[in-house]
Image (tube, grey):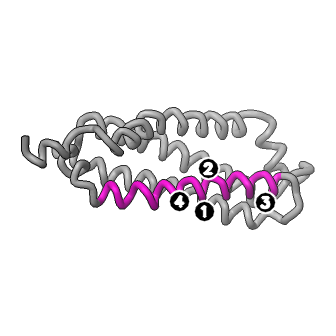
Amino acid sequence: MSKKEILQGIRDWLILIAVGVVFAPVFQLFKVAFYYDILTTQTWAFYTDPTAPFYQPILKPLLYLQVFGNVSLLILSIVVMVHFFKKKETLPKMLVTFFSSNFLLGSIGYYMVTLIPQDTPIEQIARLKSAEEIVIMGIMCIIWIPYLLVSKRVKNTFMN
């Protein structure tokens, strides 16, 4: 058995990537459902109507960004999952794009949240949630992007 054959297949650290790839569409679907619910209920008016008590001008574009971004990430996560199980050669770059896009969406969202005046209830909740997402995605990018780009197992597994 050659070294190339030993370092091939979904084993070792690549199993963690596989778990993430399988669950990513589910998590993205929950995010899309959350924002869809906001767009289709009175909650939308509560945050975007200038006469509403919690109105902030930045919330409307922030919510649109989150909807568009999360729908895009849902589609990308499904494509990534298909490419993962077909062991496509493009998978590592697609996963790098997925992780980077998630981090970028979170960073832009966090910046937009900082434009909400401080000490408002919505600002405090949104800032905390946005910061949490950035930290999680930042850690994932730091760990998995180098692994995807350098790992011999990844190169030997995704060759179709």
**C-alpha distance separating marks 3 and 1:** 16 Å
Start-end of magenta stretch: 122-149
What residue is rendered at 54% in x and 37% in y? 27
Considering every residue shown, the one lying at the far left of the view is 1
Does the magenta portion include 57?
no
Q: Is residue 139 magenta?
A: yes
Name the residue beneath numbered marker 1: 108
**Which label's residue is closer to the chain start, 4 or 2?**
2
Circle nearer the N terminus (3, 2) = 3
| Quadrant where the C terminus is found in the figure | top left
Height in image: 79 above or below 142?
above
- Residue beneath disc 3: 57
Mark 1 element type? helix
Instruction: From the image, tell me which residue sits under label 4.
Output: 138
Precedes in sequence: disc 4 or disc 1: 1
Which of label 3 and label 2 is nearer to you? 2
Question: Would you say residue 37 is visible in this rendering?
Answer: yes
User: Mark 1 or mark 3, which is nearer the start of the sequence?
Assistant: 3
Determine the CA span between mark 4 and mark 2: 18 Å
Q: Residues within 10 Å of mark 2 (few under 14, many from 20)?
A: some
- Type of amino acid at the residue the image marks with label 2: Gln
Q: Earlier in the sequence, mark 1 or mark 2?
A: 2
In-front residue for pair 138/73: 138
Kind of residue at disc 3 = Pro
> Which label sits on residue 66?
2
Q: Dot 3: within a 10 Å radius of its alpha carbon, few (fewer than 14), some, or many (20 or more) residues?
A: some
Q: Residue at x 59, y 34 (%)?
A: 30
